[in-house]
Amino acid sequence: MAERLVVIGGDAAGMSAASQARRRRGPDDLEIVAFERGGYTSYSACGIPYWIGDVVDGPDALIARTPEVFRDKYGIDVRLHSEVTAIDLDRREVEVRDHGKAETYRHGFDQLVVATGAVPLRPPVPGIDAGGVFGVQVLDDGVAVRRAIDDGAKRAVVVGAGYIGIEMAEAMVEHGLDVTVVTREEQPMATLDPDMGRLVRDAMADLGIAVRTGELVQGIETSRDGTVEAVTTDGGTYPADIVVLGTGVRPNTDLARDAGIALGRSGGICVDLRMRAGGDGVDGVWAGGDCVESYDLVSRRPVHVPLGTHANKQGRVIGINIGGGYATFPGVVRTAVSKVCSLEIARTGMLEADCVAAGLRFVTAIVESTTRAGYYPGAAPITVKLIAEVRSGRLLGAQIVGREGAAKRIDTLAVALWNEMNVEEMTSLDLSYAPPFSPVWDPVLIAARKAWDAVEDDIQRWHRASGGDDAR
């Protein structure tokens, strides 16, 4: 009799796990059923703002594999509009609500993958559940926002200025909407230090987006029919036909918690290196994607970092292990990129505030350069910021804001972080050069050199203050 694998969640982590397990074990050996509460599987959630902004086609273009492909080609039974409402670890069953048939049933499992993702944070203010207020987390959310725009919305307020917030703001500006972004932070993009976030704010203003920083949402005003009319903050009232929540997400762990699966300090499901749920591992239960916590290789602490790159890798690890192989997910360095119009934004590792919270002493270096040789046509500005540990010079974090050709340089810095390089070592990196691609001194190398100068200056200050012979 075939072993039964149940997957909760039909997107990145869940379907990567199911696909990898199928590659290693055939249908006669492993029966796979995936339950998805929404109407789509294996789609690019990161592509939603670009579909809404008419940069790419959608929603079909965002779907990698349909339920029909999973069934016919891979022998995986994907059930849409099927919400798992409970996990019974003792009986090895899940309770499923089929919203299409309006019925509830139970389904047994031998192995279970929890890939329930994350849910948008909704400020606890009056009117937050009004019609026209959208979180943009799954493809169904994108369909709803696009429908509202097509129905004639003219004014939009985005609450929060993280990745989704700024990407959705740009998308709605492209549709001709009057857009206001409200954030309680000092600058947009709290995943950057404020000095780098200021560059993002300037670009948003150039695009025609009104950015209101340091304002706290107090309520959503609604019409008599319960649809949104305005967003009220402690700094003003902003009319709106659409409100998009870009205030971040939390791991969707209610099912796991209620089943007795351990959660970690970050709020995500606790997993081991092989992605077994519960820290020490619950027999036959795995978890991956936005619902789990990961190990930060730089801060050496557990973190919740909801990114599709991690979800796909974690799902692959789970599938290999279920399939009889051995794989691990070692951790993350929190690398991410985004853009506002032509401005590219990237970060990896720790921010200054993260270093302070971790009790690390650090120096910073900021350089302004160009993406190509200054004399070459198309050379555009780029600002690179590095954070390095004092004394050791270990790279702790990096941020890049610039125009075309800027953001992907963050990958070089992510590799340096992954390998625990110090900024002195980085000054000698053998990076490629040709005028169409870089100045002869790449901005990454200039920043590394400046960061090492700051480390050496700090060493010399310590040397003079201590009166010692050697600060190292």
Image (tube, grey):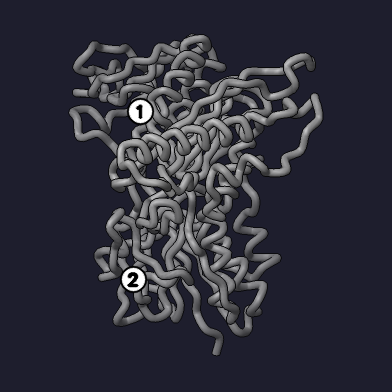
Alpha-carbon neighbours of circle 2 within 10 Å: few (<14), some, or many (≥20)?
Answer: many
Taking depth in this image into account, of 20 and 3 the one nearest to the observer is: 20
Residue located at (65% from left, 31% from top): 56
Residue 415, image x and y in percent? 59, 49
The mark nearer the N terminus, 2 or 1, is 1
Amino acid type for the residue under numbered disc 1: Gly
Residue located at (41% from left, 42% from top): 390
Left or right: 123 in relation to 306: left
Left or right: 401 in relation to 279: right
Q: Is residue 3 above or below residue 245?
A: below
Amino acid type for the residue under numbered disc 2: Gly
Q: Is residue 236 above or below residue 185?
A: above
Residue 244, image x and y in percent? 39, 28
Residue located at (50% from left, 75% from top): 5
Residue located at (63% from left, 29% from top): 443
Asked if one can make out residue 332 in the rendered structure from this viewpoint, the answer is yes
Left or right: 38 in relation to 73: left
Dot 2 and dot 1 residues touching (CB under 8 Å):
no
Q: Is residue 271 above or below residue 408?
A: below
Mark identifier at residue 278: 2
Mark identifier at residue 160: 1
What quarter of the picture does the N terminus occupy? bottom right
Asked if one can make out residue 36 in the rendered structure from this viewpoint, the answer is no
Alpha-carbon neighbours of circle 1 within 10 Å: few (<14), some, or many (≥20)?
Answer: many
Mark identifier at residue 67: none
Q: Secondary structure at mark 1?
A: loop
Q: Quadrant of residue 382?
A: top right
Q: Secondary structure at mark 2?
A: loop
Taking depth in this image into account, of 359 and 69 the one nearest to the observer is: 359
Residue 272, image x and y in percent? 41, 70
Left or right: 108 in relation to 318: left
Report, in whole angstroms, how far the alpha carbon at label 2 lies from the one at label 1: 32 Å
